[in-house]
Image (spheres, grey):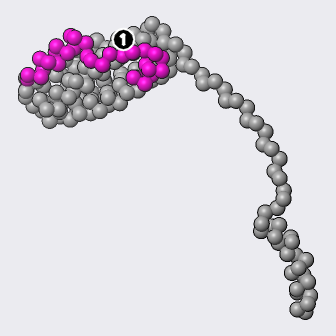
Amino acid sequence: MSFLFRHKARVFSPILLMVLGGCAYIAPEQPIAPPLPALAKPAPFTAADADLAQKLNALNLAQIAAAKNARTHAGRSDIALVAATIGQDLTALQARLTKLATSHALTLTDKPSATDQKQIDQMQHLYGAAFDKRYIRYFSSADARIKPVLAKQIAASKDTDLVAIARDTQAKLATYQAQLH
């Protein structure tokens, strides 16, 4: 029996070497992958889309700056908390808007308008109840100015990303307005 076992081991050893050592099988060449399709460029902004992006940018920058002041100058803690939320939410919306504008080769300003900046500077010198009253009035005024613009542009715009940002802004402003009163 030992002879038979040795004989089988010799017969199977070349096969075993091929299995363990790799076989001489050569894989056929893989076909060359087709080239990737060109990235679809976003549809260009219309003049109305660019105008909306600029107005949203101005609103966001002004509201973020005013909210930053409200966190430290507000007399009511609820206004300070809402301001913190406004700052966070509008900063996130601003980042989305900036990314969208960049993809359309649109340059957005990085400062609030001169009129808004003047009001923000005036509010910076107020504290407590005086600040609260002025901040709520400023927020309500800005909200009243942007509401019709957002409604009109949402209906007219063909850029789905810009419409989504405008709708998010519209919803958030309505929420803040309700919380501030």
Query: Observer-nearest residue: 84 or 34?
Result: 34
Give the residue at the far bottom of this rendering.
1
> Which residue is rendered at x = 39% and y = 13% of the image?
52
Q: Nearer the viewer, residue 133 or 72?
A: 72
Quadrant location, the C terminus: top left
Looking at the rendered structure, the kind of residue marked 1 is: Val
Task: Return the residue at label 1.
Answer: 149
For the question of whether residue 14 can be seen, the reply is yes
In the picture shown, does residue 158 fall above or below 127?
Answer: above
Q: Is residue 18 left or right of residue 127?
A: right
The answer to which of 110 and 160 lies nearer the viewer is 110
Query: Based on the displayed image, in which of its 4 quarters is residue 80 positioned?
Result: top left
Side (left or right) of 98 relative to 86? right
Instruction: Pinpoint residue 26: horizontal percent, then vertical percent.
Output: 83, 53
Give how far across and how far down residue 109 sits, in percent: 32, 16
| Residue range of the region highlighted in magenta in the rendering | 97-126
The vertical placement of 146 against 14, above or below, is above
Residue shown at 91%/90% (left/top)?
A: 3
